[in-house]
Image (cartoon, grey):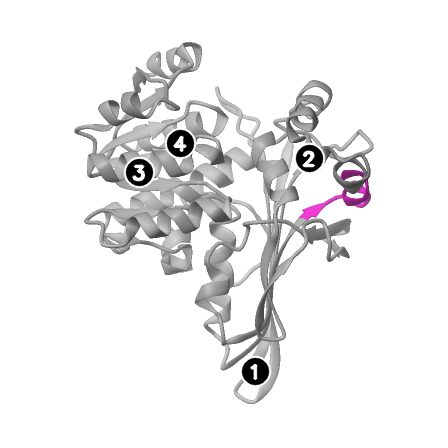
Amino acid sequence: MKVALLGAGHIGQTIARLLHGSGDYQVTVMDRNAQALALLAKEGIGTQQVNTEHQPALAAALRGQQTVVNALPYHLAIPAAHMALEAGCHYFDLTEDVAATKEIKRIAEGAKTAFMPQCGLAPGFIGIVAHHLAKRFDELHDVKMRVGALPAFPTNALKYNLTWSVDGLINEYCHPCEAIHDGAPISALPLEGLEHFSLDGVEYEAFNTSGGLGTLCETWSGQVRNLDYKTVRYPGHRDLMMLLLDDLQLKNDQQTLKDIMRRSMPATMQDVVLVFVTVSGMKNGTLMQEVFARKIFAQREGEQPLSAIQITTAAGICAAVDLFREGRLPQKGFIRQEQVALPDFLANRFGQAYQQSRQVESIG
């Protein structure tokens, strides 16, 4: 399969190496950063310098490709999807942006090719897990999805290091959050709904953020009492972010906040991804709860050390593309994450990254 991979950042490079290394994909990485492309070219991976924000240039580059894998910032998802449609390509991305996903769903209506956004960790794998658990219940009460990409060794007041896109981070902190409460769809405020919990002897907090539950509200509408998604951080992070975004009004000057974070907050490759899903309801007349909880750690060995967020995000989208290639997913139109069977995902050669993690508590 010929794949045009848009974006040669940390996640894009990981995706490129996984797909190229499998031997089943002819990958061409497209980016305007010549230095990043040169690193991949040395490894025998196809590259093409393209201004991915210039639609005519991108449209020309996509001609002759079969599949577009988009690892660009979230604000480029809609134009990239339009260009994929124009080129007659299948389309996969990592976006957590709700508005982008709704537009991509509209683009996919009547399309002869497939469009599958939200293929990362959250949205992505977390929705696959939640849907898998939810289907086991006769009557569904509560679905709680919690995900955190955290530094293994927090040292600053925010107890946070940059582990992924600053643009994506601030976007999910500033936009309304879809949820279902008492059977009705609601729009919750970001950073609200604070809760605390312990897992594996570590204290965490969780709060509302936008986009993580993907299309599950629509899928389970009218069938669940409560469904929500929250981001996990170490205790104290939420209060300081509210100070920055609300009290100091940086939500109205997001570029300044992003500049501050990039300048003052170190990135880290030593991170841990926490996945925690609880589902409760009735089974055979008994109130039951099922839990899926895992921690995925960075891989420090090898020529290219990988952060946990690189591992989990790249595994998500590569597994989706691979399952699609194998015919295990619909071959045209809009594809939801919950259409991926969890056993298929975990058995996939890329999805096995989640199997190799330390299982705090899990079910198959």
Asked whether 363 falls inside the magenta stretch, the response is: no
As helix, strand or loop, the secondary structure at mark 1 comes to: strand
Q: CA distance from mark 2 to mark 4?
A: 34 Å
Tell me what residue is drawn at x 54 percent, y 45 percent: 357
Determine whether the residue tagged by mark 4 lies in a helix, strand or loop: helix
Q: In which image quadrant can residue 298 be found?
A: top right
Task: Kindly identify which numbered label has been placed on residue 282.
Answer: 1
Q: Is residue 152 visible?
A: no
The magenta segment: 232-241
Q: Tag 1: residue type?
A: Met
Q: Earlier in the sequence, mark 2 or mark 4?
A: 4
Q: CA distance from mark 2 to mark 3?
A: 29 Å
Q: Position of residue 143 (x, y in %)?
A: 58, 67
The image's mark for residue 252 is: 2
Vertical comparison of 305 with 109: above or below: above
User: Which residue appears at 59% of the width and 39% of the height?
Assistant: 171
Task: Name the amino acid, label 4.
Answer: Ile
For label 2, count other residues whose C-alpha is less than 10 Å away and answer few (under 14), some (14-19) or many (20+).
few
* Percent of width and height locating residue 352: 43, 46
User: Which tag, 2 or 3, sits closer to the chain's start?
Assistant: 3
Q: Which residue is mark 3?
A: 82
Q: Amino acid at mark 3?
A: His
Amino acid carrying mark 2 in the image: Asn
Q: Which residue is mark 4?
A: 15
How far separated are the C-alphas under marks 3 and 4?
22 Å
Which quadrant would the N terminus be assigned to in this image?
top left
- Mark closer to the chain start, 1 or 2: 2
Q: Is residue 135 above or below residue 323?
A: below
